[in-house]
Structure formats: structure tokens, C-alpha cells
Image: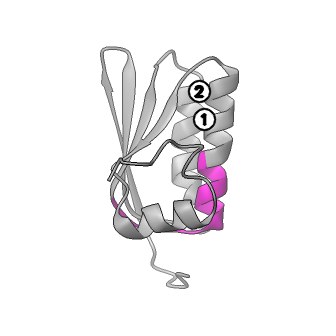
Amino acid sequence: MSTDESATIAVEVQHDAGAALVTLGGELEFGTAAALRTTLSDLARQECDPVVVDLAALRFIDSTGLSLLVQAKQRFAAQGRRFELRRPTHGVSRVIETSGLAELFALEGDR
């Protein structure tokens, strides 16, 4: 668990042909989750589909981050839209798998 008060997250959004690609870098945890929460809320009000979150540069995720991703998946699904995770690092993938969420995010074979 990350307890470093200087933990940071980078959130970048690119739009292409109706889709939104959200690229994350750094650490997604209690102290940094607000940035992604705001971005996903903004995207929920837009008409992009799918919303794809690229995790290739994410070094760490905690239960707050996992909860945020699950809530986003549910919100977009309720709108009839796709929300996908792509390219998780080994460590992040392991946390998702251990949490029992790999099937929800269809991560098998996506490393």
C-alpha cells in the first residue's frame, strides 16, 4: 500500500472517432482518485463510446482506485456504453485479478 503523501497521478484524455482514450500514469489511490473521478464524470456527460482506460503507465492501484473503476464501468453500462481497461501492468493486473474483478473488465489475455 502506498502511503507516500507525494503520490501523483497523470490523467490524459484523447478523443478519436467518437471514442475516448484515458491514459493513466503514476498511482491511483485514495489521495489521487479525485482527478480520475472528475475526468470520468466529464466523459459520462459526453457522447463518447467506448471509454477506454489505458493502464500501461499505472504503477499502483488501491481499493479506492478499484472502486472508482467499478463504479465507472457500472455508470457507463447503465448508459448503454462500453468502459474498458487496457494494458494493465503486471502489478495492477495482479491486484485486479486478486480482487476478483478480472472477468468484469475482461482482462484475461490482455497483458
Above or below 14: residue 86: below
The circle drawn on residue 41 is 1
Question: Which residue is at 45% across, 79% downward?
Answer: 6
Marks 1/2 in contact by CB < 8 Å: the verdict is yes
Question: Which residue is at 59% across, 27% downward?
Answer: 44
Label 1, residues with CA under 10 Å away: few <14, some 14-19, many ≥20: few
Residue 26 visible? The answer is: yes
Residue 90 occupies quadrant:
bottom left
| Amino acid found under the numbered disc labelled 1 | Ser
| Amino acid found under the numbered disc labelled 2 | Ala
Q: Nearer the viewer, residue 106 or 84?
A: 106
Q: Position of residue 64 (x, y in %)?
A: 65, 62
Q: Nearer the viewer, residue 44 or 59?
A: 59
Question: Which residue is at 54% across, 52% downward?
Answer: 102
Residues in magenta?
57-69
Which residue, as the protein is rendered here, is positioned at the far front?
Answer: 109
The circle drawn on residue 15 is none
Label 2, residues with CA under 10 Å away: few <14, some 14-19, many ≥20: some
Q: Mark 2 — residue? A: 44
Quadrant position of the N terminus in the picture? bottom right
Q: Position of residue 71 (x, y in %)?
A: 68, 43
Q: Position of residue 24 (x, y in %)?
A: 38, 52
